[in-house]
Amino acid sequence: MFLARVGIMSSDHPYSPAKRAGNHIYVSGALSVDHDYQPVSGRKEAVDAALERMRERLATEGGELRDVVKLTYFVTDITLREECNEQFREHFMDNRPARSFVEASALPYGASVEIDAIAVVE
C-alpha cells in the first residue's frame, strides 16, 4: 500500500504528505518511486514519477498542478536538469511557478528525484 498517497502515517512517514492551511497547500517531497517505494529507473521516467507522486499528494488536499506557485526539485544527478526543464515546460508553462533546482547526495528509497511544492487554491 502506498502510505503517503492515502495519508496514513507510519514510523517511517510521521509527517503529512500534503497539508492545507487556508488556501495554501504544502506538499512534502514526493519521490521518484512506484507505489511500493521501489525507485523508478530511466531519467525521464523518474522525473515523471516524482511529479505524479507530487500530483497525487496535492490532490488529497483538493489541489491541481495549475495551483502550484513554487516547486523545489532535488536530484541526485545535476544533469537531470534538462529532463526536469522539459517536464516543467510541458506541465507548468501556462502557470510558470517559481522553481528551485538542487543536487543532493542521496534521496530516500534510492530515488533520483524528489519534488516538493506549494500551491494556492481558490
Image (cartoon, rainbow, N blue to C red):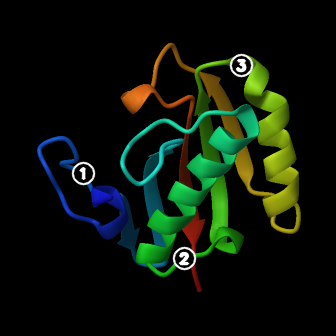
Task: Identify which residue is drawn at 38% across, 43% down.
Answer: 37
Q: Amino acid at mark 2?
A: Gly
Residue 87 pos. (x, y %): 80, 49
- Asked if residue 82 is positioned above or below residue 116 in the image, the reply reads above
| Secondary structure of residue under mark 2 | loop
| Secondary structure of residue under mark 1 | loop
Any mark on residue 15, and which?
Answer: 1
Q: Amino acid at mark 1?
A: Tyr
| Secondary structure of residue under mark 3 | helix
Residue 101 pos. (x, y %): 68, 31
Q: Which residue is labeled 2 in the image?
A: 63
Q: CA distance from mark 1 to mark 3?
A: 27 Å
- Asked if residue 17 is positioned above or below residue 121 in the image, the reply reads above
Image quadrant where one finds the C terminus: bottom right
Q: CA distance from mark 2 to mark 1?
A: 18 Å
100 sits to left or right of 25: right
Q: Earlier in the sequence, mark 2 or mark 1?
A: 1
Q: CA distance from mark 3 to mark 2?
A: 29 Å
Furthest residue toward left: 11
Task: Identify which residue is drawn at 38% across, 71% down.
Answer: 21
How crowded pointer 3 is (Cα within 10 Å; few <14, some 14-19, many 20+) is rated as: few
Q: Which residue is labeled 3 in the image?
A: 78
Any mark on residue 71, and which?
Answer: none
Q: In this view of the protein, which residue sits in the foreground, 83 or 45?
A: 45
